[in-house]
Amino acid sequence: MVSRTLKTVAAGVVAAALAVSAAAAETLKVGVTGGPHAEIMEQVKAVAAKDGLDLQVIEFSDYVLPNAALNDGDLHVNSFQHQPYLDNQIRDRGYKIVSVAKTVIFPMGLYSKKIGDLKELAEGATVAIPNDPTNGGRALLLVQSAGLVTLTDGAGLTATPLDVAENPKKVRFQELDAAQLPRSLDDVAVAAVNTNYAMSAGLDPKKDAIFIESAESPYANVIAVREADKDAEWVAKLVKAYHSPEVKQFIADRFGASVVTAW
C-alpha cells in the first residue's frame, strides 16, 4: 500500500514538473515573408529555444496581412518590413504597433530580362514598381539614382509617379504588388524588386541586378510588436537571439553582400 502510494505521489510530481516546464517555454507566433526573412527567423528560432522561447514561424505572401494579424492579436511579433513602411501603416491604419529592434537591409535592385544596361532602355519603356506607398517611393528614388527620372523637390520616401518632374525617356510606370514583380519581368522592360522577393525567385542581387541601391539606406528592416508588449521579457529575449553572433554569421554565410545586418 505504501509503495503504491509513493508511486502515485511520484507520478504526480513528475506530471507537475512537466506541466511547469511546458508553461515555462513561451510559444510566440512570428510573422515573416517567404525567402530570407523566413530563413533568418528559422535560425533565430534555434537560438531563442536556448532561452526558453518556442517560435512558431508563419509565412505570409504579401506585405499587408502581417501587420493586420499582429495588430489583431493573431501574431505576437512580425519581422518583414522596413521602418518607413511600418510608419506608413501606422499612420494610415492606426495600428498600435512599434518597432523594437533593427534587423537587416535588403538593397532594392532594378532587374531586366530584356536589357543588360540601363543605357539600352528604349523610349517609352515600362518600368514596374511596388504598389505600396513606401516601397513605391523607394523604387522611384532608386530609378532617380539610376538617372532615368528626376523627382520633384521634397518628394521624399513616399514619392509617387505623379512626383516625376523630368522623364527624358518617357518611361511608363506600372504599379504591381511587390511579390508579383519578379514574374513581371517577362512583360516589362525593367522591374524594381525588393531583395527578399528577388532571391525567392532565384535572382542574385549582386549578379542579376542592373542597378542596385546603396547600402547606406534608411530602409533597415525591423522587429515589430504591439505597443502593449514592447517591454515584455520575451521581446528582449527575441531581440537578443536575433542579434546573436550565430545569426549574424548565418546571414553573412548564406547571403553574402545581398543582405546587410543593421545592428
Image (spheres, helix red, strand yellow):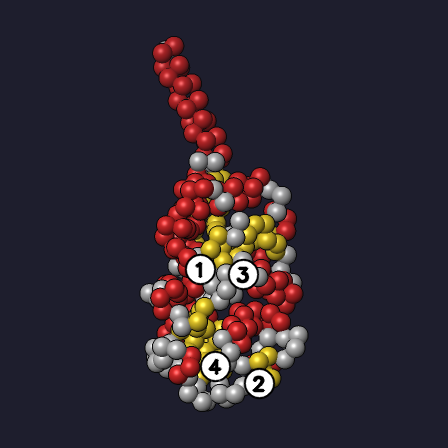
Mark 3 and mark 1: span between their CA atoms?
23 Å
Query: Could you tell me which secondary element the residue under label 2 belongs to?
Result: strand
First in sequence, mark 1 or 2: give its number. 1
Residue 2 placement: quadrant: top left
Provide residue 48's location: percent of width, then percent of height. Answer: 46, 40
**x 57%, y 85%: residue:** 166
Q: How many marks?
A: 4
**x 59%, y 53%: residue:** 99
Mark 2 and mark 3 in contact (Cβ < 8 Å)? no
Mark 4: give few (<14), some (14-19) or many (20+) Cα within 10 Å. some
First in sequence, mark 1 or 4: give its number. 1
Residue 150 placement: quadrant: bottom right
Mark nearer the viewer, 4 or 2 = 2
Location of mark 3 (residue): 216
**x 62%, y 62%: residue:** 87
Is 231 situated above or below 176? above
Q: Amino acid at mark 4?
A: Gln
Q: Amino acid at mark 3?
A: Glu
Mark 2 and mark 4 in contact (Cβ < 8 Å)? no
Mark 2: give few (<14), some (14-19) or many (20+) Cα within 10 Å. few
Front residue of 137 and 75: 137
Provide residue 223's location: percent of width, then percent of height. Answer: 54, 52
Location of mark 1 (residue): 33
Mark 4 and mark 3 in contact (Cβ < 8 Å)? no
Q: Amino acid at mark 2?
A: Glu
Location of mark 4 (residue): 174
Q: Amino acid at mark 1?
A: Thr
Provide residue 221's location: percent of width, then percent of height. Answer: 52, 57
Mark 1 and mark 4: span between their CA atoms?
23 Å
Query: Could you tell me which secondary element the residue under label 4 belongs to?
Result: strand
Location of mark 2 (residue): 166
Is 147 situated above or below 53? below
